Image (cartoon, coloured by chain):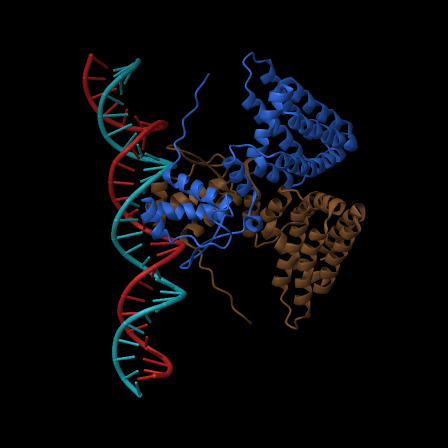
Chain colours: A blue, B brown, C cyan, D red
Amino acid sequence: MQIGVIEVPSRKDLLVQKIEEQILSGKLRAGDSLPSERQLQEETHISKTMIHAALVELERKGFLQITPRRGAVVANYTETGTMETLNARIRLNGGNMSAAQARSFMEARIAIEGAALRRLAERRTEEDLAYLEEIIAQADALLEKEKSDDAALAEVLFRFHRGICLRSGNEFFPLLLNEFRPIIMEFWMRSIAVFGAASNVHLAKRYLELIRAGDADSAFRRLERSVNEYLSCLEEQ
Amino acid sequence: MQIGVIEVPSRKDLLVQKIEEQILSGKLRAGDSLPSERQLQEETHISKTMIHAALVELERKGFLQITPRRGAVVANYTETGTMETLNARIRLNGGNMSAAQARSFMEARIAIEGAALRRLAERRTEEDLAYLEEIIAQADALLEKEKSDDAALAEVLFRFHRGICLRSGNEFFPLLLNEFRPIIMEFWMRSIAVFGAASNVHLAKRYLELIRAGDADSAFRRLERSVNEYLSCLEEQ
DNA sequence: CGCAAAAACTGGGCCGACCAGCATTTTCAG
DNA sequence: CTGAAAATGCTGGTCGGCCCAGTTTTTGCG
């Protein structure tokens, strides 16, 4: 077994994580003021530069609102939160989504990828099909290797489904998939573990066939069905 | 007329913007290497701390790929881009979307908000309705003031539609709306300019009625129709 | 010429000082 | 005592330099 690079979190990252924990656990509530940067510096013995960088990162993630020369207050992250906020929440939970979160995620996936699938099936060109076939070929190549590489296959599956969004002609759909990326990769890893590598690649081929046939409705229903299969499989565990 | 706070962009922000411009204009192409941080420091007379922060921000936005101790290269932002990348592109274009972008945006809106609308109509509670009514009341209060404040109304309309996503019970939908926020606000400002303030508030009330009636299909069609009206109005200009 | 040691450079993390602007307190003329 | 102006002390923001650990290029010995 290969041992990856051991990532040492920096002190700044640790501070970010600590404050995130306090906010998500409710110890710090929306509207609460944070100590000033200098005060945090004394408490943590981290330089002001790094303290400042940590607070800026937390503001970007939607956890804080910083007003120059006035200080930082905890934001209501249901108001200001973005996908990054959610990624932080999931990471803090050990990388696991709750069942409700998984269902929410899948609903969002159906809404976005389903719309892309419909659009693409209705107006696919030879070029679109060739683009997706090329990705399928990469997946097949991975299947034939004796040493299975689940992470690489998950990456290819991500690229296939982003390809559907990319080729749908809508500029927004692929961007949304990129935004979801960490969560989607986690999903594909699980899907490969549960249903097997070959089964996932086969499903991708099925989507390609339905797109080629121009059968938007069937493609959409196929997506709904496989999502439901996955969710019920998850609930069994 | 009230003059708001004049925001002075920091030198870091200016550097970020300048590099974004060079990438979006094609002066810097995917794969090109950027000068080292120390070289940029000499050229721009900006401290290394800020140079580094700027490059990290550009990487987060999908414009660069940084490899530790090797340097930064321009990324293919169609591959790595997120909503932030798009926001930057639109901002650089003076806040204007192309017609194709507007259509893509509206398709994405139908996909996401439509799904939320359906879900909410099917399982709304009294609490959900009260939450949305409270926002509508704020909109009415704005309408009655003699001094019209379009920006405030756009903010309320945004909150109403995010409220639909929030109350749909899906955790992801409101986050996606937050992600879109700058674009959505621009859209509401235009909608108010084109159709008038009262008309937009009236439409919101109509959504609320359909949600209360539990008529998911009608609510969805209403959304599709108003989107199409907006797009055809845009194309006339 | 071959190739390994050394030098030069890279981004990453960190530090303590300094800057400009806001808020409160202090000062001091009226 | 009053009230405006000056001084002080706070804030977030920026700065340039330090060391570290890898990468790339140059050097120089065999």
- Left or right: B163, with B52 as reference point: right
Tell me if residue B99 can be seen.
Answer: yes
Count of numbered badges drawn on the protein: 0
- Image coords of residue B165 (percent x, y): 66, 47
| Left or right of B16 on screen, residue A174 | right
Give the residue at x 44% y 44%.
Answer: A19
Query: Which quadrant would residue B193 be assigned to in this image?
Result: bottom right
Residue B237 place in picture, x, y as percent: 71, 58
Viewer-side residue, A3 vs B120? B120
Depth check: give the residue in front, A229 or B113: A229
User: Residue B64: x percent and y percent?
Assistant: 47, 38
Q: Nearer the viewer, residue A103 or A4?
A: A103
Image quadrant in which the C terminus of chain A is located: top right
* Residue A201 percent coordinates (x, y): 65, 21
Q: Is residue A65 left or right of residue B120?
A: left
Does the rendering let one see residue A48?
A: no
Residue A28 sits above or below residue B8 on the image: above
Pick the residue in front: A81 or B213: B213
